[in-house]
Amino acid sequence: MDADDRHHEPCLELLATHPGPLVVPLLVVTEVAYLLASRLGAEAEVRFLGDLASGAFVLEPVHPADWLRVAELVWRYRDLPLGTVDASVVAAAERLGISVVATLDHRHSRVVRPAHTAALTLLP
């Protein structure tokens, strides 16, 4: 959403060319909305909410079993630190068998070892 951000072009290209579906764990929505509102204002947050309403993304809820996995990941990678939102992405990827994840936090995400694959493929 921020054309001045150094990651804008690669992210825009990913969103424009990825064949989909683009699965967004529900906890990510709260973090993205907060970051957009605090950095770019209400207009950016509302645009993001409109994208969600239009079905641009598949929202993935946190399943009951995910919470224990999230807790395990937060504890295991506490020195990063890996927070609840990032751990929920890993838990959802494991449950859904997804090995490709879009994130700008490659430094931390490269360290995490999911249960279902040797490593996640990180985009963009």
Image (spheres, rainbow, N blue to C red):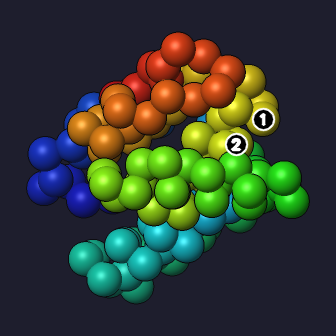
Q: Position of residue 65 (x, y in %)?
A: 84, 53
Up-down: is 88 above or below 103? below
Residue 7 quadrant: top left
Labels 1 and 2 touching (C-beta < 8 A): yes
Q: Position of residue 78 (x, y in %)?
A: 40, 57
Left or right? Give the position of 109 relative to 99: left
* Circle 2 Cα neighbour tier, 10 Å, few/some/many (<14 / 14–19 / ≥20): many
Q: Which of the pair 89/78 is nearer the observer?
A: 78
Left or right? Give the position of 112 relative to 69: left
Q: Which numbered disc covers residue 104? A: none
Using the numbered discs, state the Cα–Cα distance from disc 1 to disc 2 in whole angstroms.
5 Å
Up-down: is 58 above or below 82? above
Residue 32 quadrant: bottom left
- Amino acid at the residue labelled 2: Ala
Q: Position of residue 61 (x, y in %)?
A: 78, 58
- Which element type, helix, strand or loop, lies under badge 1? helix
Q: Which of the pair 74/17 is nearer the observer?
A: 74
- Amino acid at the residue labelled 1: Arg
Q: Does residue 13 appear in this view?
A: no
Q: Residue at x 61, y 52 (%)?
A: 72
Q: Residue at x 57, y 29 (%)?
A: 114
How many marks can you see? Answer: 2
Q: Does residue 105 appear in this view?
A: yes
Q: Which of the pair 118/89 is nearer the observer?
A: 118
Q: Where is mark 1, residue-wise?
A: 95
* Circle 1 Cα neighbour tier, 10 Å, few/some/many (<14 / 14–19 / ≥20): some
In the picture as drawn, the residue positioned furthest to the top comes out as 118
Q: Residue at x 25, y 38 (%)?
A: 107
Q: Where is mark 2, residue-wise?
A: 92
